[in-house]
Amino acid sequence: MKKVLLSLAALCFAPSAATLADELPQVANVLARRITSLNGSWNYIVDVQEEGYYDYRMKPMRGGFFLNAKPQRPEDLIEYDFDKAPTMQVPGDWNTQDERLFFYEGTVWFKRSFDWHPNGDRRTLLYFGAVNYEAHVYVNGRLAGHHVGGFTPFNYDVTDLLHEGENFVILKVDNKRRAENVPTLIFDWWNYGGITRDVLLVDVAPTYVENYCLGLASAEVDRRGNRPVTFSVKLNRAEAGRQVVLSIPELKLQQVVTTGSDGTATLTFNARKLQLWSPASPKLYDVEIRLDEEVLRDEIGFRTIQARGKQLLLNGEPIFLKGISIHEEKPHGGGRANSTDDAHTLLSWAKELGCNFVRLAHYPHNEYAVREAERMGILVWSEIPVYWTIAWTNPDTYQNAEHQLTDMILRDQNRANVIIWSIANETPHSPERDQFLGRLAKHARSLDASRLISMAMEVTSASNFQNRLQDNMSQYVDVVSFNQYIGWYRDVNDAAKMSWEIPYDKPVIVSEFGGGAKYGLHGEKNQRWTEEFQENLYRENCAMLDKIDGLAGTSPWILKDFRSPRRVLNGVQDYYNRKGLFSDRGEKKKAFYVLKEWYEKK
Ligand code: GCB
């Protein structure tokens, strides 16, 4: 059959049929629901020239994969038994599971079969934690939906596509970079393709709690220690009069809300003697949310975050964010990370460095990482991949970015450790960019007014040694953040001479600084790529940062070397960005100790 695949003309047309399942808003806290995992071995076919043709309208499907050069009649279709194709692990990127796919950017088809027993009037959602970048999802040969965006969850109601006995899911996954995508054509990380996060079947009642939000309503506390807490809940349907019960057993607290005609309800009540969440004491309360017989459990922390003048206040107290940036890669090499264990290792390294904060760059990381950081007392900056240039004037690009932002917020809005939503990274100034980002910032605030908004800006230099930050976006953000690379993209000796002007009465975060070093390469401090060069660069930068007025935190670039196709130097980079304080295998470089020492004094 492989012969057929190769000999076919390069012609494919994607099914244009309307999707058959409902694409639903994301179901929150998915791991606490009744789930059946579809993780594991999936068959796959690499389809470089898009020969794959899959259209249920041509022929009832039995799980075959159909190939033909523009089939006109059903009998012209050639069926291939997909189960004979090789397998790879899901979740997982394809780049590190098949060496032929290391640099691959294109289409791969996936298939997995499973047994299923429909359960009365209950509904079944098919949930993907993330698929990079574009996915067409078929269930038993019928198109369930199409999703764009590589780092956020999506789900379909597939109840009516499933039947008793054996069922199958087929995905067409395409990670080709495109100018109108978010991110766009150029970005400094590996474009890992595939089904990179969990695939789950979620069993829900016809009416279920789709999402909820629980947290402190404000920083107020009265003389008796009461604090206002807000609970809001949204059902999947606009059903009025449904009662949802919130319980926090440890506080002996129970509240009942009743939905209005839009299926939502909100209540603010006082909670007494709440122990607040903080890095020093990451207290989480077991919480139950009940609708009829269905109970959703979560662990929720309570804290406030505010910007006051140039200060950041956590629970009303000034805090300095001792951070580090992280990409979502396995700690000891081997591609995309997607587990609590991976997250725990990376975050333990951050803790060892003295961090209370991580910047999860440059896209929403998996939910395991955010939750593990919360348990470990680590504050989080979470970001969408509006990176460098974007097709600012393209309305679809805007919708795509807004969609990713919405899904990031809906997934993590109950995490006490997430304090900053970042809407962009290093975007060159223009009126079109200002309009795009201004709209995005307003959207973020309309969804979540309880957190801070920021973006990694670029410094505009007034003169050689006087750096000035001037960005029209500063009016939309609560925290002004910027990246700077003195010592790497500019002479390290300039650091001591620099002065900084940040003309905004807002907290300042230096969201990136750093330079490359190859682990184990030693030499003089002025010798690029040596550990000594990076060590000196960190020394000079830390001394310089100490002079920035209103500095509220920093997240140097980066915890660990990460794969990037832009880093092509043989023997030095080998397709790794080497700015890590740890090597790609997890070995500490000398600069680690410089930053650690600086953080100890902060
Ligand atoms: C940056 C980018 C980051 C890059 C880094 C670098 O400014 O925000 O994504 O990886 O510089 O290493 O050049």
Image (spheres, helix red, strand yellow):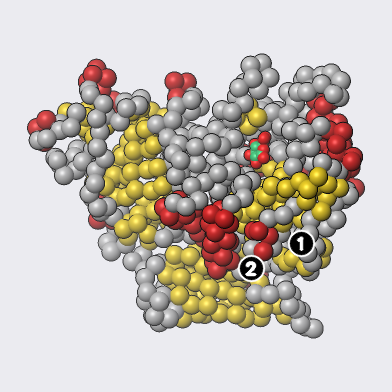
Badge 2 marks a residue whose secondary structure is: loop
Q: Residue furthest front?
A: 463
User: Which of the pair 500/587 is nearer the observer?
Assistant: 500
**Mark 1: which amino acid?**
Tyr
Q: Is residue 466 above or below residue 76?
A: below
For label 1, the residue is 504
For label 2, the residue is 450
Q: Residue at x 35, y 26 (%)?
A: 48
Residue 24 left/right relative to 225 = left
- Determine whether the beta carbon of the residue marked 1 sits less than 8 angstroms from the nearest atom of ligand 1: no
Query: Which mark is drawn over residue 458?
Result: none
x and y percentages locating residue 479 in the rendered image: 71, 59
First along the sequence among labels 2 and 1: 2
Classify 10 Å Cα crowding around label 1: few (below 14), some (14-19), many (20 and above): some
Residue 347, by quadrant, is top right
Q: Residue at x 81, y 32 (%)?
A: 491
User: Which of the pair 141/325 is nearer the observer?
Assistant: 325
Q: Quadrant of ligand 1?
A: top right
Classify 10 Å Cα crowding around label 2: few (below 14), some (14-19), many (20 and above): some
**Mark 2: which amino acid?**
Ser
Q: Residue at x 78, y 64 (%)?
A: 505
x and y percentages locating residue 307 in the rendered image: 74, 65
x and y percentages locating residue 498 in the rendered image: 86, 43
